[in-house]
Amino acid sequence: MDDALVLRASGLERRYGSRAVLRGISFDLPRLGALVVTGPNGSGKTTLLRLLVGLAAPTRGTLEIAVDRGRVGYVGHEPILYRELTALENLDLFGRLYRVPERRERIGMLLERYGLWDARAERVSAFSRGMTQRLALCRALLHEPALLVLDEPHSALDEDGAVLLDGELVSLAETCALVVATHTPERLDGVATTRLALGRS
Amino acid sequence: MSSADQYVAAAYGVFVVVVLVWVAVLAAKLSRLERETGELVQLARARPVAGEQADG
Amino acid sequence: MSNTKPSLTVLAWGAVALVALAAVMIFVVAPEDADQGFSQKIFYVHVPIALTAYACFGLGAWKAFRLLATRGERYDLESYTGVHLGTIFGVLTLVTGAIWAKASWGVWWTWSSNQLVLFLVLFLFYCAYFMLRFSVEPGPRRERISAVYALFGVALIPVSFFAIRLANDFIHPTVFTREGPQMTGEMFAAFCVSWASITLLAYVMYRVELAGKRTDANLRELREALQP
Amino acid sequence: MSAYLADVAALARKDLKLELRARDTLPAMLLFVLSTLVVFHFALPADAGEDAAYGLLWVALVFTALLGLARAWVAEREAGALDGLVLAPSDRSAIWLGKTLATLAFLAAAELVALPAFVVFFAPLDASALGGVVLASIGICAVGSLVSAMAAAARGREVLLPLLFLPLAIPLVVGGVGASISPDPGTYLAFLGLYDAVFAILSWAAFEYVVTE
């Protein structure tokens, strides 16, 4: 795979028992590209994203990723946080596991930027869905990923939260490759370089 | 039959019975597979042949 | 794909012939045991079945290791079939062992027979294998978890055998050991033929059962592909 | 290597912090082991020898450990936190080692209550018996953490965990009881050490395959 690409999928297939959730998925993603994945519920969007971040293995086909695990950021349907830990404790734990340099400063900056600094000592279980989503984004951005994978990031945000996210995506698109599964592709028109529509398999 | 003979017969009998039960289970699976392949053949016949579909 | 393995029919007929030969050897050729008398004949079926059970668990574990090492999808069914067959022969070992215990010592169960106790532990362990397997969604996750559990089983066999031998030191200080009966030439020959026949029979059963499971899987995939 | 140990420490600390905050596993284990010992008192006939009491101590310890193991991966399953740990660049066996150490801490706390109570209620415990408890606890937590991770991926995990765990715990009970009552405890302690070595390494190597696809 030539080094202009960050991601190459050819003939990806994923099966649960006898049910094929994904079949014949192929695409390339340039180094700073942005892939927008659309499709109805159950079309395999989440499964494809889990394949891209390495949480699932394809049943057939090949997937080449130029980024190692430590440089991938992922925001899934689940917040992927500890509900009974506070925002600070969550980011501190993941910061250690991702070996983030100047961990405290980076956590402070991210919490500030996403309006969570005041709630930093509160447990995630006390967070609203919007706040949890933003904290999950902080967790995904903590280690400055080269590939950021977002599964319907707008779904839990109110209007101004969504606008804030759109602005972020524009600036992020300059520094890392993006893969975004969404039901509102028009919000990403300014960023998208590649598109993939998954039909009902 | 002395008690010893009974036990020996029982041991070998159990062995044979278990193998036969296993064969019976396999036979049941075989007949199910046969029925299922039959259904699949119907499904395959019902589908338009790929060639015709092009100009169908 | 050309199947380089010996064809199943040849093996099946081989197994039939060998079992017949074993029956003749056991009941005609081999003399009756001096002190145990006729009930000693159970030895010729009980011990080979136990050894075959170990072999099946070993095969299941080997295929499980291959699955984990090479992500080969086909090894899951092979490991599953190996463990399944091992459990069948394990149960047979327990039953024939109990019958032999009754014939020799008048009791259906004895904790002092290390091998019987080991098979009881393995029976509990491998029943849990199927409970585990049927409660995880089909897919790579189930295959890998089942494989890891099958590997633990093989590690458990020697450890448990050693533990049971240790346990017998304080449960029954007077350990009731029954060294293998002094076997004459014909007896030993009968044992070897019987062992070979049961092992071959088990391998044929393994291949037949595997073929059944593979056809099942292929059919489900075909049905799903043909679904309008 | 030190980064690996730092990850393990961070993960184990996280479990202790969660437990101190929620306080739902440790108090339950302490009360469970005490009430089990009391029940055993009534279960034993008046003239039962000390050997029976040692046997029952091990039944109490194994089932108390099971209580702790049943909750081992609850925090990770909430909100998909386990995916976060699996995604992290650190070696996945660190997740297992962190969980094993945390579970060992809880089991040790329960034993700090159970063993004195046993001595008061039933029979004395000599050095080799305590050695047996320590070695067996390591084996219980090492194998238990892996097996509870397997059960966590299954439906009906509360029922499944004891079925998966108990056959594997039989050698530990034999070693533990042997270390308590046998005139020659050395072989039993050595056997427990062998079990710990074999199954800790196996669990350490196999954990990656249980949590990834």
Image: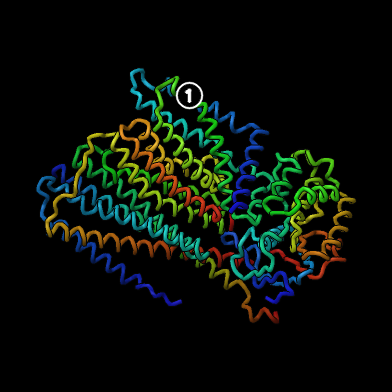
Query: Image check: A176 left or right of A94?
Result: right
Residue D44 in which image quadrant = top left
Residue, far top = D46
Image vertical order of residue A84 relative to residue A106, above or below: above
Identity of the amino acid at label 1?
A: Pro
Please state, as top left, top right, bottom left or bottom right, where the C terminus of chain C lies in the image: bottom right
Residue C17 at x, y percent in the picture: 23, 66
Residue D23 in which image quadrant = top right
Image vertical order of residue C58 relative to residue A27, above or below: above
- Give the labeled residue for mark 1: D116
Query: Image check: D108 left or right of A82?
Result: left
Residue D147 at x, y percent in the picture: 51, 46
Residue D31 in which image quadrant = top right
- Secondary element type, mark 1: helix
Task: Answer whether residue B32 is visible to the viewer in this image.
Answer: no
Q: Nearer the viewer, residue C151 or D120?
A: D120
Query: Image check: A176 left or right of D62?
Result: right
Q: Nearer the viewer, residue B42 or C64?
A: C64
Residue D33 at x, y percent in the picture: 50, 28
Chain under disc 1: D
Identity of the residue drawn at 46% across and 24% down: D37
Residue C9 at x, y percent in the picture: 33, 71
